[in-house]
Each structure stands twice: as structure tokens, then as C-alpha cells.
Amino acid sequence: MTSLFESVRLGAITAPNRILMAPLTRARATRHHVPTPIMVDYYRQRASAGLIISEATGISRQGLGWPYAPGLWSGEQVEAWKPVTHAVHEAGGRIVAQLWHMGRTVHSSLTGEQPVSASATAAPGHAHSYEGKKPYEQARPLAREEIPGVIGDYVQAARNAMAAGFDGVQLHAANGYLIDQFLRDGSNRREDDYGGSIENRIRLLREVTQAVVDAIGADRVSVRLSPNGDAQGVDDSDPSALFATAAQALQQIGIAFLELREPGPDGTFGRTDVPRQSPVIRRHFSGPLILNSDYDLERAQQDLASGLADGVSFGRAFIANPDLPKRLRVSAPLNSPDMATFYSQGAEGYLDYPALEDQAA
């Protein structure tokens, strides 16, 4: 039976265990979206993960609307990421950069321009800003002639990630952000070749993925999807058909691995009654499949044993437990995360969660 503590090949990366660190927005960069020294320590502490997927990282000024989140579009950002990747590698770890365009969830107070999306829609709720939460604004639809430029931003960010020392990239196509806004018919009302049919709605995902693969190699590229239920107001009327087709396209491109965020009806960070789509996707994607959302050791082992998953990514558990793989291996108690410090800017709730050795001392 496959164990969570066995190694797994993820494209060009050999992960020593199947416990991945999920992408986690932590808001510790500068207002100019440049990584900071405390981020070096944070990622170094968690280098025992089979693979670290970085916090969502902006591909462009247009696409980044989260205060104090890092980017990967400038030379200054690339240089500031280098100590982070070096620290992870020095500690024996592996790390990929998650590439992010937020689409309609960007607020103009951060970018100075109207947000963009597949169509003229607005997300429900409120956006984060430096002045507090503000109602989301209506996005303007990306013009057909603008789309190659957005694809180019993904490619440049991927090249920048490799220059910064990352082992690869993950394309953020989940959680109601730009690519997800194109994928699902609840937010994509276009009438051109990026809207309407499923084949048209997956076009942006396919083109971005292929362009990034052409730039840095398929074995360095992964994708994250959130195929079941509403994500920031983005949903689809037929998720099984949509995500089966998307999985087939990613299979053909030959990406390193696919990660799925799938909350359940009793989810602790989002919930839905829409069934998990991983069994459908598994039938159409034979590469490594990483599952995410509310996993513990027992459930993770069950999905590995059944062949549904090749690994599991843990989010909040990694926030509070920098040595999570060791704790799971020895069945040690887990520290509880403090949500009040998830997006604060200091070391509290970031660098001060104790490892097992610290607690024993």
C-alpha cells in the first residue's frame, strides 16, 4: 500500500514524501509586492514538505490585488525571491512558485485600473485593500486582442520564477480567479472563441499552460483547479463535463502534476454540496494527482491506498506546524493555527509556531 511517507516523482522533481505544502496567502511582502527577509525564514522552516507550493504570486501589476502579496514581474522581485529559494534548497527542500492573476477580485485602489475578467461581472462580497475591505467592482471583459498579452505575462513570470531559483511553477486556475472565471459558465458569458462551449471556455487554461510549458518545460509546470462548488461567486452548471475536458487537455500537454482543491459539505474553509470531481478527473488524467481540503492522516492514506490520489497538500496545518511531515509520521499533536494572524505583516503567527524539538525543550 502506498504510504504518505514514500517518495513520488512530480515531473522533474522527486519529492521525498507525499505531504505537499499547499499555496497559502500570508501577506508578508512589501506594499510594492517584493518578498521580505522573514519570508526566507518562513519557507526554510517548512522545507521538510515533499514539495512547497508558494503562496499565490502575482504575474503582473494588473493581476495582483491582495495587499502585501508578492509578485514575480520585476527584477527587484526576482532578486528578493532568490534568498527564499536558496534557503529552501539549503535545508533540503523543493519549492515551486504559484502564478496568480486575480481577475475580477482585484480592486482598483491597488492597481489604479478597472479589474478585468472573462465578462462584465462582479464578485460577491468585499475585496481586501490597504484601506480595509471594499465592495468588489464590476470588471470589464478582456478584449480578444488583450489575451495574448496576459498569456505573455504568465510566460514572463514563469521565466522569472526559474531565474529566482524555483524548481518550477504552478498555474493558479482555481478559487474564482482569472483562469477559473474563464472556465466556468457562471462567470464566462463571452460570445467569442473563449466563451460558450466547454472547449472554448478551457481555451485560456490550455493556451496559458502550453505557453508556459513551451517556455520552461512540461516537467516544471503544474496546475491547480477547484472543480466542485462555488468559489468567490464562480460556479458551473456542469462541473463533471467541464473538468473532465480540462483534465484531458492538461493530460495531452503533459504537465508535471495536477492539484485539486475540493471542499466538502462540512468544510472548515469553504463548503459545498457539489460532489468531489476527483474521481471523474482521475479517469481523464493519469499523471500525479494531488488532493487538498480538510485532510488528516487517515483520510490522506485512504485516498492514496485507493489510487485516487498520489499525494495530499496541507494548508493551515503547515501554517501552524513547520515540521508537519515529522508530526504526522510520529502521530504527534498538531499546533492550532491562529486565523487572526494569517494576513498580518509581522513575525507573530508566522515564524513563532514551535517545532517538536522546541516544545520538548
Image (spheres, rainbow, N blue to C red):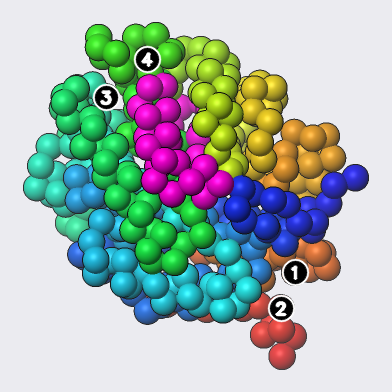
Q: Secondary structure at mark 2?
A: helix
What residue is drawn where x is 53% and y is 18%?
A: 245
Disc 2 and disc 1 in contact, CB within 8 angstroms: yes
Residue 343 position by quadrant? bottom left
| Residue type (three-letter) at the residue carrying disc 3 | Ala
Task: Tell me, yes or no, whether the two marked residues, 1 and 3, touch with CB atoms within 8 Å.
Answer: no
Q: CA distance from mark 2 to mark 4?
A: 50 Å
Eye-nearest disc, 2 or 1 = 1
Q: Which residue is mark 4?
A: 200
* Residue 199 place in picture, x, y as percent: 43, 14
Mark 2 or 3 closer to N-term? 3
Q: Amino acid at mark 2?
A: Leu
For mark 3, what is the residue? 118
Residue beneath disc 2: 356
> Would you say the residues marked 2 and 3 are in contact, meaning their CB atoms lie under 8 Å apart?
no
Badge nearest the viewer, 2 or 3: 3
Q: Is residue 222 magenta?
A: yes
Q: Quadrant of the N terminus?
A: top right
Horizontal placement of 107 versus 21: left or right? Answer: left
Q: Is residue 208 left or right of residue 297?
A: left
Q: Earlier in the sequence, mark 4 or mark 3?
A: 3
Query: Residue 346 is drawn in which quadrant?
Result: bottom left
Q: Which mark is residue 326?
A: 1
Name the element at disc 3: loop
Q: Are marks 4 and 1 in contact (CB under 8 Å)?
A: no
Q: Which residues are magenta?
A: 202-231
**Chain-order first, disc 2 or disc 1:** 1
